[in-house]
Image (tube, rainbow, N blue to C red):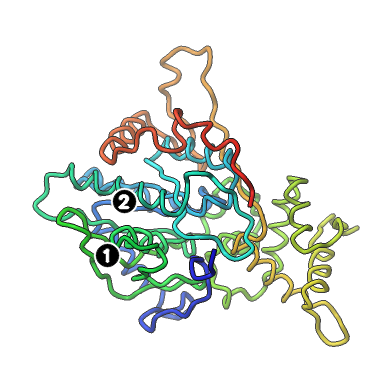
Amino acid sequence: MGEDDNEDDDEELDTNEISAGQASSRKTYDKVFKKVIDEADVVLYVLDARDPEGTRSREVERSIMAGAAAGGKRLILILNKIDLVPPKVLRDWLVYLRRYFPTLPLRASSAAANAHTFNHRELSVQNTSATLFRALKSFAASRDLKRAVSVGVIGYPNVGKSSVINALLGRLSGKAPSSSRACPAGAEAGVTTSIRAVKIDSKLTLLDSPGVVFPSSSSVQSSGLVNLKNAADAHAHLVLLNAVPPKQIDDPIPAVSLLLRRLSASPDLLQKLTDVYDIPALLPSRLDGDFSTDFLVQVARKRGRLGRGGIPNLNAAAMTVVTDWRDGRIQGWVEAPVLAVASGKKPSAAKKAVKKGAGEEIVPDQKQIVTEWAAEFKLEGLWGDDGAAGADDDAMEQ
């Protein structure tokens, strides 16, 4: 695989893009995001398969659902970067997310060089983008409109929104996704300040500028998937979500500490982490049991991140780790919430609302919505449904 295919590579952004850290950028992001939501009949909400719940915004979903009730707007969740998680994790997330909205797995582009990936057999870059393309065409064909159905793409920074757009444009041109890049993709979040509608055919139009969703501190704190004790932990969580541009990470060490806390829950993943840097088992601090200092000292020595006198530069070592995490060289993922099975209960009990991860509830009507929307896009039986539950049991780790 070539680095040109990497959705998070460091290619130079177009001049009409702005950095997320510039003073006026948030207003520009919000303006483009609102325009994408307003103009799109179908909204593709791109999530990172390593932490789908962490890259969701309930506020955004409620806004789109309001549009669905008023004018027939539709929302599909897109699980991107699926090659960075094992098959069971992928299936569990598909089952969980499909209780709320139709959800499709996608490999919008090839992984970064030296990334640790899983080969999910038929879930290739070409096949998953083709499936999404067919689903959109099916929906467009079913709508009795005198105009083309417009499709918009939204999501957190660096979840692969631009790569999703380019994958769809690649299907249109008949070329590989990377050869039809109307939308720039890179490691630093950027946004095009104008939206161009690309006509796919008489029934379907694609908006080529992605809408960027910004996580609020409240949504991060209430995610329920990671123990966030304070604002520093919340910011570290955003760094691990790749929602903070590298140039704006003043202190990457808290993010590495949070990553180590997550991975230490799995001896296997912690071992894989030490294997990446070819370092021995980590020694916890005598004061608080934290591995961070020992880990960063060893990484600094292995990667040559040293200051004067050979003193390890912990900040530089931490940025190396954050970059390796972003590009998938470090394995790690969040497990899907366990769904309670209502066995032996009266049928009426199964119809009660089910608690969501952020303390909200799924009303019984949600299942009907998911079923009806999935039928409109002809999504029945696609990967992750009951009929294909064991399709990828023997996926190979690359």
The residue shown at (47%, 50%) is 124
Residue tagged by mark 2?
133
Q: Residue furthest bottom?
A: 308
Left or right: 184, with 335 as reference point: left
Residue tagged by mark 1?
35
Q: What's under tag 1, amino acid-wise?
A: Lys
The residue shown at (24%, 59%) is 38
What is the quadrant of residue 326 in the picture? bottom right
Q: Secondary structure at mark 2?
A: helix
Count of marks, rendered view: 2
| Label 1 crowd bin: few (<14), some (14–19), many (20+), radius 10 Å | some
Closer to the camera, 91 or 31?
Answer: 91
Q: Position of residue 300 (x, y in %)?
A: 79, 73
Left or right: 353, with 370 as reference point: right
Whether tag 2 and tag 1 are in contact, CB under 8 A, the answer is: no
Tag of residue 384: none
Q: Secondary structure at mark 1?
A: helix
Whether 251 is drawn above or below 122: the answer is: below
Q: Position of residue 43 (x, y in %)?
A: 31, 53
Lower position in the chain sequence, tag 2 or tag 1: 1
Whether 37 is drawn above or below 384: the answer is: below
